[in-house]
Image (spheres, rainbow, N blue to C red):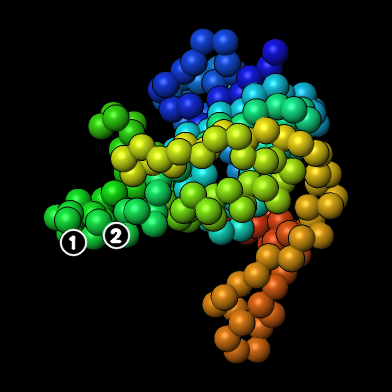
């Protein structure tokens, strides 16, 4: 059994390969989550990522989750936990303003000890419906989707393998880019290339 715990932080699970991009968390594998996992297609039995997906932007989430799905065996389980942004927005007037902003945009200081930089910021939001629809594209059907407080917990089972080459042909829609002369859709392959160019040009 190979079980991958992606974005583990300091919460390492016994029996899992605990993976994180922050060395100070002392994971089993230090790995930049924006890059493909070092595992073969259809090799993992389970994958868990709680408090990770919301830290990926509108486009990067396709690249990263697509890679997670690639590694998962057909029949394998995926466990995801993300903030319930739909519910969070409804609580705006119940929060102190600064507390609401902190919760909405994320926390860059993990457990008041480890600075995460931009990795701590929330970059996308989900409801139960949008999270389920997003994951279903990757050949994963929901088994259980529940909410606890402000968190959505999703468990799904991979029912079919969607090759990366097929994902690359997906057309991703941009609401903002539809205004003006630019295209309002790009293929995932084009997006990956733009991301790669950015990463090469902006290495610190």
Residue at the image point whose x is 29% and y is 59% from the top: 90
Sort mark 1 into few (<14), some (14-19) or many (20+) by Cα contacts within 10 Å. few
Quarter holding the N terminus? top right
Q: Which residue is identified by label 1?
A: 93
Q: Nearer the viewer, residue 50 or 153?
A: 153
Marker count (numbered):
2
Residue 120 percent location from the top left of the image: 39, 44
Q: Report helix, strand or loop for mark 2.
A: helix
Q: Report helix, strand or loop for mark 1.
A: helix
Q: Which residue is identified by label 2?
A: 90
Rendered image: mark on residue 44: none
Q: For residue 35, what is the image quadrant?
A: top right
Which residue ends up furthest to the top in the rendered image? 14
Residue 155 percent location from the top left of the image: 57, 33
The image shows residue 45, relative to residue 127, as above or below, that is: above
Instruction: For residue 45, say whether it is visible.
Output: yes
Q: For residue 159, what is the image quadrant?
A: top right
Tell whether 83 sits left or right of 190.
Answer: left
Residue at the image point whose x is 60% and y is 34% from the top: 143
Q: Nearer the viewer, residue 20 or 136?
A: 136
Tell whether 130 sits left or right of 101.
Answer: right
Q: Nearer the viewer, residue 185 or 154?
A: 154
């Amino acid at each position: 059994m190979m079980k991958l715990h992606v974005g583990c932080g300091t919460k390492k699970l016994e029996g899992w390969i605990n993976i994180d991009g922050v060395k100070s968390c002392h994971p089993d594998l230090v790995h930049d989550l924006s890059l493909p996992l070092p595992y073969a297609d259809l090799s993992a039995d389970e994958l868990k990522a709680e408090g990770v997906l919301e830290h990926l932007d509108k486009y990067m989430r396709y690249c990263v989750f697509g890679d997670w799905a690639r590694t998962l065996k057909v029949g394998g389980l995926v466990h995801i936990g993300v903030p319930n942004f739909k519910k969070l927005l409804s609580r705006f007037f119940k929060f102190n303003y600064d507390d609401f902003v902190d919760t909405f945009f994320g926390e860059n200081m993990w457990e008041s000890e480890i600075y995460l930089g931009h990795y701590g910021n929330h970059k996308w939001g989900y409801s139960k419906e949008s999270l389920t629809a997003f994951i279903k594209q990757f050949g994963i059907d929901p088994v259980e989707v529940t909410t606890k407080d402000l968190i959505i917990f999703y468990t799904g089972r991979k029912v079919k393998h969607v090759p990366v080459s097929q994902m690359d042909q997906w057309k991703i829609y941009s609401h903002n880019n539809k205004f003006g002369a630019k295209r309002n859709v790009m293929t995932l392959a084009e997006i990956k290339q733009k991301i790669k160019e950015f990463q090469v040009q902006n290495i610190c």
